[in-house]
Image (cartoon, rainbow, N blue to C red):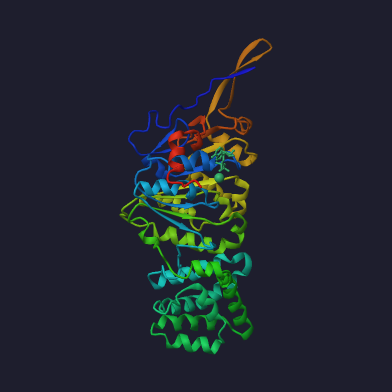
């Protein structure tokens, strides 16, 4: 028999979070508003309560300070349950569905660029996002000037409504001589310069064709009529999201996650880049549910590092770490986990590596064990991997930046009448 002389914390701050603004982590634990900006990670298998027990309770109550949010909401469930309530608080809600049928909102990644460097970065990101398909990184490098030339050329054709990625694909189908004529006539000499750079890289017709093909591969996704439509014009600006409290919900089906990944990657990089600036009017919560499904978020470690200085909090919910290893590799996954300074862990995790990581973060504790009728003291981890895995269904473990452990219950929104009321607000029953 063993009795742990456990040292679980009772509260993250040693005292209750003061003030009206906080992020609820669990039944009894609230994260102070300022601590939210050292980021939050939620790890639990499907059905444990990442959405219903952590993201929704916060979005359905008044505890969040007026702020803007970018919410990756794959199933659209967060939008359905929270947008009416957020609107009732005077916040703006935008649902952007890249593959939606009746999309009210559009976002044109090319139109969002405000200068040459951004167009060039977009071309680079688009090619990098297609690396799984293009495979050869040399071709990616050599193709960059061609895509930059095309995008920059189209960027100027705003009035004709041609400044979008779908048009870029049509342009690519033009013969090389025709393309050259177009670029040479562009008043911005950088367009032709980029094209000449591209021509220099292609030492033969065959290489040029391969480079053109790489660009076509990066653009192909945009020929999907639904994506072409949702990226043709912009109804909102990334740079404006923080001017008034705005909730931008991004919805896409799980089944289409792989297909849409190159776009999501580029879109996300741009959103992050453009919403990270000095002196914003409102703080920004960047919430990604099921983060393992959207592929690589470029420079996520950079934003985890600098986010705090720009009033940006990153909240990532994930099912397991193995999938994160596939996307980010082991080292970067660890950097991400370390960057998410408050971690909430649910029951039933089978990832041994992750269980070890969480267990090792905890301090050692003394255990009294009775052996042959004698009391002996032994040292053990506050929570062993097995104990973490075998927590009860609605139990969670919170580990904060001081590696303080707190065991608590998950706070499901549907067990709170007030939150349910907020979720159902304005629903019309037929
Ligand atoms: N409105 C609801 N009423 C009752 N149970 C619900 C409701 N919404 C979700 N649940 C249950 O809450 C649990 C957690 O669900 P969820 O938060 O969606 O899991 P996760 O996001 O971790 O995959 C599940 O068992 C689910 O069936
Ligand atoms: Mg969920």
Quarter of the image holding residue 142? bottom right
Q: Is residue 77 positioned above or below 217 on the image? A: above
Residue 230 appears anywhere in the view: yes
Residue at position x 44%, y 81% from top? 191
Query: Residue 328: x percent and y percent?
Result: 57, 54
Front one among 376 and 66: 66
Quarter of the image holding residue 120? bottom left
Query: Residue 134: x percent and y percent?
Result: 62, 69
**Along the horizontal axis of the image, is 252 left or right of 109?**
right
Q: Is residue 254 positioned above or below 359 on the image? A: below
Query: Residue 21: x percent and y percent?
Result: 35, 39
Residue furthest to the front in view is 430
Query: Residue 297: x percent and y percent?
Result: 52, 56
Residue furthest to the top in view is 373
Q: Is residue 41 positioned above or below 158 on the image? A: above
Residue at position x 34%, y 49% from top? 90
């Amino acid at each position: 028999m063993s009795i742990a002389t456990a040292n679980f914390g009772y509260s993250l701050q040693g005292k209750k979070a003061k003030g009206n603004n906080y992020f609820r982590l669990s039944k009894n634990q609230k994260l102070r508003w300022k601590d939210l900006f050292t980021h939050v990670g939620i790890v639990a298998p499907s059905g444990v309560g990442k959405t219903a027990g952590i993201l929704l309770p916060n979005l359905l109550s008044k505890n969040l300070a007026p702020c803007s949010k970018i919410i990756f909401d794959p199933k659209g469930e967060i939008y359905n349950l929270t947008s009416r309530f957020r609107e009732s608080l005077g916040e703006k809600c935008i649902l952007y569905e890249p593959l939606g049928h009746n999309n009210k909102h559009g976002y044109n990644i090319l139109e969002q660029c405000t200068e040459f460097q951004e167009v060039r970065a977009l071309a680079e990101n688009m090619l990098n996002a297609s690396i799984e398909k293009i495979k050869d990184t040399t071709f990616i490098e050599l193709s960059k000037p061609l895509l930059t030339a095309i995008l920059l050329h189209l960027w100027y054709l705003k009035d004709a409504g041609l400044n979008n990625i779908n048009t870029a694909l049509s342009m690519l189908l033009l013969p090389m001589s025709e393309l050259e004529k177009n670029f040479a006539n562009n008043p911005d000499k950088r367009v032709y310069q980029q094209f000449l750079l591209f021509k220099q890289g292609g030492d033969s017709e065959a290489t040029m064709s391969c480079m053109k093909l790489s660009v076509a591969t990066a653009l192909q996704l945009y020929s999907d009529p639904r994506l072409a439509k949702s990226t043709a014009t912009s109804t909102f600006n990334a740079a404006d999201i923080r001017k008034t409290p705005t909730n931008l919900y991004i919805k896409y089906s799980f089944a289409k996650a792989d297909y849409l990944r190159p776009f999501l990657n580029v879109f996300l990089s741009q959103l992050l880049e453009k919403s990270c600036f000095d002196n914003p009017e409102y703080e920004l919560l960047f919430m990604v549910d099921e983060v393992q499904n959207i592929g690589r978020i470029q420079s996520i470690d950079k934003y985890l590092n600098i986010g705090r200085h720009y009033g940006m909090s990153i909240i990532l919910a994930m099912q397991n770490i193995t999938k994160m290893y596939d996307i980010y590799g082991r080292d970067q996954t660890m950097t991400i986990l370390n960057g998410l300074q408050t971690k909430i862990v649910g029951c039933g995790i089978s990832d041994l590596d992750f269980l070890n990581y969480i267990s090792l973060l905890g301090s050692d504790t003394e255990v009294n064990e009775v052996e042959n009728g004698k009391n002996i003291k032994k040292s053990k981890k506050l929570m062993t991997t097995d104990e973490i895995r075998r927590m009860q269904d609605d139990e969670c473990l919170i580990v904060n930046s001081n590696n303080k452990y707190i065991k608590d219950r998950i706070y499901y929104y549907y067990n709170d009448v007030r939150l349910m009321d907020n979720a159902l607000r304005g629903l019309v029953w037929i």
